[in-house]
Amino acid sequence: MENVFEIIGKAGLMPVLTVERVEDAVPIAEALMAGGLPVAEVTFRTEAAAKSIAAMAKVAGLFLGAGTVLKPDQIDQAIDLGARFALAPGFNPKVAQRALDRNFAFIPGICTPSEIGLALEMGFSVQKFFPAEPAGGPNYLKAVAAPFRGVRFVPTGSIGLEQLPSYLELPMVLSVGGSWMVAPKLIQDRKFDEITKLTRAAVDTVAKVRSK
């Protein structure tokens, strides 16, 4: 079985996609990969989400996850659509249990010590810190994660290129989620070259921080 979290951690960056038009899905995937990023998350926030996940899951070399998983049956849907992992903005024990039952890689969302503890108790040692910036950013994450050694986090929420290094420098951060390189306006205007450019800049930042 592939090590999902090793792949996510190696990339160090996870673009969070909200896709409104199915026809944009594959071009977005190709733009990300052209920028050197083979990992992405497509959120279940639009009517086009399911078909977009299915389309992008078939793109060779792209390691795709389904995001904004709020209900247990969305775990089943993510699997059926070809996603390799799933993420949630919060911690719902019923959703988490369905992922465990299906032996499917799942990253539950947390924001407090209590949520970290509950998710860890269920066996989830990789957790999504959301909403990262509004909740207090890297300093808050560093403080709240201190008692939970061994837990790795994927901070997501209002993070841009400027904030990226401060999260990557934290040893408990596995990868950082963000949407600045795949902003809805860029997708709407089909500026896939710009997505590639922004992605490449982000990938370069990850490499620079991790080389220190």
Image (tube, rainbow, N blue to C red):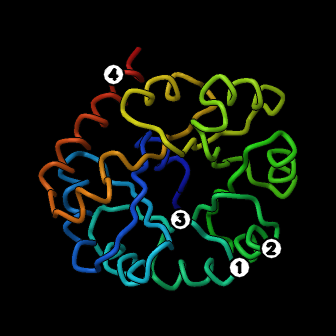
Q: Percent from the top left, x then y, of residue 186?
A: 23, 56
Q: Which residue is mark 1?
A: 72
N-term-proximal mark, 4 vs 3: 3
User: Are circles 1 and 2 on residues that touch, CB within 8 Å?
Assistant: yes
Lower position in the chain sequence, tag 4 or tag 2: 2
Residue 208: numbered disc? 4
Name the kind of residue labelled 2 in the image: Lys
Q: From this view, report whether residue 117 is shown above or below residue 87.
A: above
Position of the N terminus by quadrant: bottom right
Q: Amino acid at mark 3?
A: Gly
Q: Answer with left or right where residue 86 lies relative to residue 185.
A: right
Q: Which residue is mark 3?
A: 67
Amino acid type, residue under disc 1 in the picture: Pro
Task: Provide residue 67's location: percent of width, then percent of height.
Answer: 53, 65
Q: Residues within 10 Å of mark 2 (few under 14, many from 20)?
A: few
Q: Using the rendered view, name the quadrant where residue 160 is placed.
A: top left
Residue occupying image coordinates x 38% and y 19%:
211
Camera-side mark, 4 or 2: 2
Query: In whole angstroms, how far apart are the C-alphas of marks 4 and 2?
Result: 39 Å
Q: Is residue 153 left or right of residue 164?
A: right
